């Protein structure tokens, strides 16, 4: 129920006499007599409105007044009752309608979807990589100029001992350090110690 | 403390290694949750999600575009979007509706593309005539012989009748009855007023119930 007002509320009064479209929807005996006899066009409109109202009622998309009106028809009007029952059956049909035969088996869909998913990220990586490279270039060019010496000193100083340690004690002790810091262990000792490192993993 | 630690580790390992088996046993709700846990859905869980909901995607696309030959491609595209965005779905309970919406949006994207590429005449013609195409006249009653009407036959007839509706009426009634959308959502999605939605739904129902009368009366 959204509560919007129907633009043609005044047309809801039924015309009981003239109705060219009443094969399925006879004028209701309880309809208030129309104050002025209307032509068939208005009658068509009112039939349309009545059906539309019933349809909206089925969807819970009516105002409180409209709901009351429809519920009154449903109690007193056999034709509306019948239509209502028919529309409920139609709805039931929609809901229980089996899915159509798929043009391809679901496992094939799964396969194709994953093939696409796994292929596409590579493309996006290319673009992403380009973007990151551009960002890096931008960052380097932005920060490289003069005003930065203190920061670069702080950044370099602590790493220096780590680099120098394996170099200064190149023998037995150096091996331990190289194991701890495989990334920095470029000397020959580190290459020889490959096996223990692999076992450690 | 020292005891609880190894236990929790082993249980974590157990659930991680059993995930592929479990996906099939999960409820729909938990399965969606499972697909949301990682940055990207885990493959076996997502494949299971597809197995469960592919028929729904098929149904939605079939009724929105009964005469398109490439619905299978469209369905794949739906799943790729789901894969990428499922993490953003706040309430897993709403997965089905969310999935319908993705399929519908994709259908409309595609429809717009196709209309743009078709002959220029069709840009105007269907739009201006659209709501007049389906009038309220009642088709001459076809009594037909009283026969044993199976449910199967009813479904076939219903499918056919839906497919025969002019496009705007078909899509509107499908959004309402198969996807369960509210009028306001439909109006927003299709870019028309609430009054138009209401009228299209009523007209579509009117035609369907007239055509299928003999199946709908008295079961």
Image: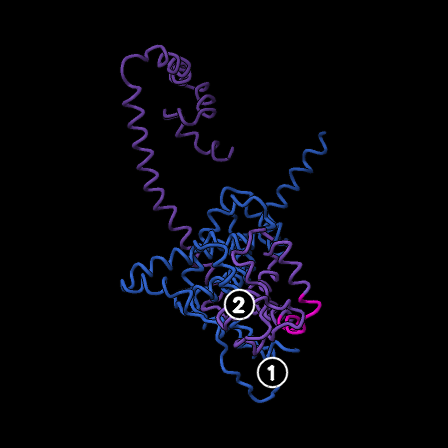
Chain colours: A purple, B blue
Single out the mark in the foreground, 1 or 2.
2
Instruction: Depth check: give the residue in front, A33 or B202.
Output: A33
Q: Please, what is the dominant secondary structure of the magenta stretch?
A: helix
Q: Badge 1: how crowded within 10 Å, few (<14), some, or many (20+)?
A: few
Dot 2: what SS? Answer: helix
Q: Chain of mark 1?
A: B
Residue A125 visible within the image = yes
Instruction: Depth check: give the residue in front, A149 or A28.
Output: A28
Q: Which mark is residue A48?
A: 2
- Outermost residue toward the front in this view: A36
In the figure, residue B24 lies in which quadrant?
Answer: bottom right
Q: Badge 2: how crowded within 10 Å, few (<14), some, or many (20+)?
A: many
Which residue appears at 36% of the width and 63% of the height? B128
Q: Is residue A120 magenta?
A: no
In the rendered image, the quadrant that contains the C terminus of chain B is bottom right
In the rendered image, the quadrant that contains the N terminus of chain B is top right
In the figure, residue A86 lies in which quadrant?
Answer: bottom right
Q: Which residues are magenta?
A: A73-83
Circle 1 is placed at which residue position? B149
From the top left corner, tell me how far across and down residue A68 is, in percent: 67, 59
Mark 1 touches mark 2? (CB < 8 Å): no
Q: Chain of mark 2?
A: A
From the top left corner, tell me how far across and down residue A25 is, in percent: 59, 74
Which residue appears at 60% of the width and 78% of the height? B215
């Amino acid at each position: 129920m959204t509560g919007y007002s129907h633009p043609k509320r005044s047309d809801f009064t039924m015309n009981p006499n003239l109705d060219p479209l009443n094969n399925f929807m006879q004028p209701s005996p309880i309809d208030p007599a129309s104050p002025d006899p209307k032509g068939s066009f208005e009658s068509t409109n009112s039939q349309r409105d009545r059906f539309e109202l019933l349809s909206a009622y089925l969807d819970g998309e009516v105002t409180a007044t409209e709901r009351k009106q429809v519920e009154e028809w449903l109690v007193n009007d056999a034709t509306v009752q019948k239509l209502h029952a028919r529309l409920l059956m139609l709805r039931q049909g929609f809901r229980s309608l089996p899915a159509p035969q798929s043009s391809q088996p679901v496992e094939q869909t799964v396969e194709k979807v994953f093939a696409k998913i796994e292929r596409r990220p590579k493309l996006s990586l290319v673009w992403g990589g380009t973007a990151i490279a551009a960002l890096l270039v931008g960052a380097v060019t932005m920060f490289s100029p003069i005003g930065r010496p203190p920061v670069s000193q702080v950044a370099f100083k602590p790493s220096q001992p780590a680099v120098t340690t394996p170099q200064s004690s190149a023998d037995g002790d150096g091996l331990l350090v190289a194991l701890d810091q495989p990334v920095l262990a470029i000397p020959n000792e580190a290459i020889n110690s490959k096996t223990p490192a692999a076992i450690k993993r | 403390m020292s005891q609880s630690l190894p236990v929790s580790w082993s249980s974590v390992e157990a659930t991680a290694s059993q995930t592929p088996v479990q996906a099939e046993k999960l409820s729909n709700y938990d399965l969606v949750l499972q697909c949301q846990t990682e940055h990207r859905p885990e493959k076996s869980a997502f494949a299971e999600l597809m197995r469960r909901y592919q028929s729904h995607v098929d149904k939605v696309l079939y009724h929105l575009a009964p005469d398109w030959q490439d619905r299978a491609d469209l369905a794949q595209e739906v799943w790729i979007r789901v894969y990428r965005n499922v993490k953003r779905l706040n309430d897993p309970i709403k997965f089905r509706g969310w999935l319908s919406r993705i399929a519908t949006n994709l259908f409309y994207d595609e429809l717009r593309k196709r209309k743009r590429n078709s002959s220029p005449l069709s840009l105007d013609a269907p739009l201006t005539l659209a709501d007049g195409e389906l009038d309220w006249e009642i088709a001459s009653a076809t009594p037909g012989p009283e026969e044993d009407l199976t449910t199967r036959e009813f479904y076939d007839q219903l499918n056919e009748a839906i497919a025969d509706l002019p496009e705007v009426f078909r899509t509107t009634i499908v959004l309402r009855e198969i996807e369960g959308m509210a009028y306001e959502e439909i109006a927003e999605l299709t870019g028309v007023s609430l009054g138009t939605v209401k009228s299209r739904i009523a007209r579509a129902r009117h035609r369907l119930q007239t055509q299928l009368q003999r199946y709908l009366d008295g079961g």
